[in-house]
Amino acid sequence: MATPKIVLFYVFTPLPDPEAVRLWQHRVCESLGLHGRIIVSSHGINATVGGDIREVKQYVRATREYTPFRGADIKWSDGVGDDFPRLTVKVRSEIVTFGAPDEVEVDANGIIGGGTHLNPDELHALIEERGGDVAFLDGRNAIEAQIGRFRGAIVPDVETTRDFIPLLESGELDHLKHKPVVTYCTGGVRCEVLTAIMRHRGFTDVYQLDGGIVRYGERFADRGLWEGSLYVFDKRMSIDFGAPAVIGRCAECQAPTSRVVNHPDRQGRELAVVCEECVPTGA
């Protein structure tokens, strides 16, 4: 019986020929029958790929044969089968679309001028040392935070990553400019860019959770500072670490739920947090 797996990874590194990398990645995935989303730019690669474990392992081995990707932090999770409808491999100006490709500088070690990386244990050490001065900043879209977030986190009202620069430049977060700010996102890639953009705008004590919520959940499950479920960009829609409390609320009836579906909400947005009773599966 096939064992579906999903891998998530990114690498910030100079790629002089992104189109060649795109063609190679597409060829490898297509030959193995894998689906997913891969974005390549001159700054690096951002990939989420799923399929049977045997073929996914072959893909990871092939990807790591390319020297700039050899040290990629590959995050594995269980799929449910057919987690992605198709394979898309694209070249874009940014591997995460903040709308600021000229602000991103990379070298062989990654993003230049980003925040200090903290692994989950280092994050707890910082909180123990700095206490209530530490602020969590959610680096994801607001709907993702509806079903899961770090305790006490600041959740900006953003629909896409493009909304972060106007937010930072509006002054709304200026009270954080000289406080320790820990940014977090699903696997870490959005925070790589966000922290650099923040530092360019005068935020002086910026950190990012290394490996994102995924690595934190693997380390502490439901025993740490993370509350609720983690939204993911595939057929599963969300995953849990341990047995977390349900913090999401149905947009229609306010019942507790961690269910995110492709269903327009009252503002016409495509994703909504709704319970099965209000929006049955297949509706």
Image (cartoon, helix red, strand yellow):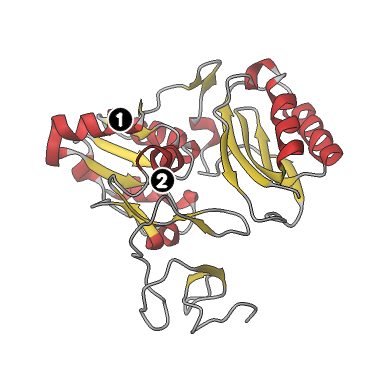
Q: Quadrant of residue 53?
A: top right
Give the number of the mark in front: 1 or 2. 1
Badge 2: few (under 14), some or many (20 or more) residues near its Cα, within 10 Å? Answer: some
Badge 1: few (under 14), some or many (20 or more) residues near its Cα, within 10 Å? Answer: few
Q: Residue at x 48, y 31 (%)?
A: 103
Specify whether 111 is left or right of 54: left
Mark number, residue 216: none
Specify whether 205 is left or right of 95: left
Kind of residue indicated by mark 2:
Ile
How far is the residue under mark 1 from the one under mark 2? 30 Å
Question: Does the image show residue 270?
Answer: no
Q: Residue at x 40, y 43 (%)?
A: 217
Question: Does the image show residue 59?
Answer: yes
Specify whether 219 is left or right of 263: left
N-term-proximal mark, 1 vs 2:
1
As drawn, which residue projects farthest toward the front? 1
- Residue 148 position, x and y percent, is 38, 57
Disc tally is 2
SS label for mark 2:
helix
Q: Are marks 1 and 2 in contact (CB under 8 Å)?
A: no
SS label for mark 1:
helix
Q: Residue at x 48, y 68 (%)?
A: 259
Q: Tell me the quadrant of the picture where the C terminus can be found.
A: bottom right
- Residue 176 position, x and y percent, is 22, 41
- Residue 94 position, x and y percent, is 59, 37
Mark number, residue 165: 2
* For residue 269, above or below residue 21: below
Kind of residue indicated by mark 1:
Asp
Q: Residue at x 54, y 81 (%)?
A: 279
- Residue 140 position, x and y percent, is 43, 50
Identify the residue under disc 1.
121
